Amino acid sequence: MEELGRELGFDWKKRWVRCIGYVVNRVVKHMLFGQDPDAFEQQIYDGQFTAAREHEQWRKRGPVGKWHNFALALRDILLDFQLVVKTLEGDGLGKHQKQGQEDEVEPPLSGTSWDLLHAYEYLIESLESAKKIAVGLPDSGHLAVNSNLGWIKLDEYYQYLNDSPVIYGAAALHPAYRWALFDDLWGDDAKRRKWIIKTKAIIQDLWECEYKGLFSEDQDSDLPNQAVDESLSSSYSGLDLDEYDQW
């Protein structure tokens, strides 16, 4: 993508959208096999690295007993990742059985670009829940470490969404979501509210640079949604607003 950007003269980072299947694969591998001192909640200098070494030794010990409850807990986490991939692919019913109860993604995913926001939020919440569940299990600290490892890698890819306006733009321009979706998901978080302001600026820049000056052959034709356009225009009577501002 970077080479294509240089050859064709576009900002490749703004057009690079990562496949959710690839992201899930990397996150799960990092959760099961990764090593990162930041995953350990002991934050006392060399104590981090001591805990990391202890965890690695624990992971190398015999699987019987130690791994039974641990594996069951990991299975539930991995089922959530499988559920997200299958529903985004349009495969399956968007639900699965976990610990004897039926689980599903809310809101349901349909495989569209804007659904990636829901998918990331769902998986992050799943990993947070796993850390709480781990408290009641033997060797609970080790499961928490693996959950943290997955969370760190998932958050890394979540942050990559900030490089491209594609996903946020798809959500903001969806008639059923618009910017209200962002307020619903993150409006209660002061840090996220600042991020929403930044995201709006990114989408505004996308409109200004890529689309505002484009001419549509249908813009003067009698389209079925003309009444909606007129309604938007009348709502801002007397104001010099372009299509995006009216939206």
Image (spheres, rainbow, N blue to C red):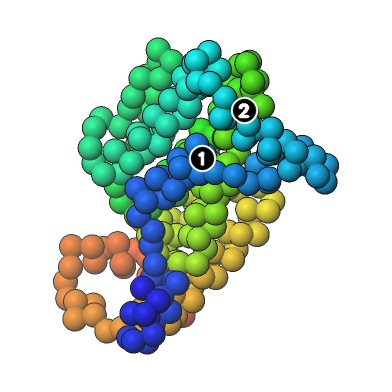
- Looking at the rendered image, the quarter that the N terminus falls into is bottom left
**Residue at the spot x=45%, y=66% of the render?**
165
Q: What is the quadrant of residue 10 in the picture? A: bottom left
Mark 1 vs mark 2, CA separation in Å? 13 Å
Evaluate whether residue 112 shows in this view.
yes
Q: Residue at x 16, y 71 (%)?
A: 222
Q: Are marks 1 and 2 in contact (CB under 8 Å)?
A: no
Please name the residue that numbered disc 1 is placed on.
33
Q: Nearer the viewer, mark 1 or mark 2?
A: 2
Apparent side of residue 145 relative to residue 78 in the rendered image (left or right):
right
Q: Determine whether 11 is above or below 179 in the image.
A: below
Pointer 1 local density, CA inside 10 Å: few below 14, some 14–19, many at least 20: few
Label 2 packing within 10 angstroms: few (<14), some (14-19), many (20+): some
Examine the image and state in which quarter residue 94 appears.
top left
Q: Secondary structure at mark 1?
A: helix
Query: Residue at horizontal 40%, vertical 36%?
Result: 81
Q: Earlier in the sequence, mark 1 or mark 2?
A: 1
The image shows residue 154 at horizontal and vertical percentages of 51, 47
Point out residue 15 in the picture as x, y percentages from the top left corner: 38, 70
Give, as a three-letter code, the residue at label 2. Trp
Image point (32%, 86%), residue name: 8
In the rendered image, which quarter is residue 172 located in?
bottom left
Q: Is residue 143 visible?
A: no
Q: How many marks?
A: 2
What quarter of the picture does the C terminus occupy? bottom left
Question: Which amino acid type corresponds to the residue marked 1 in the rendered image?
Answer: Phe
Quickly name the residue at label 2. Answer: 58
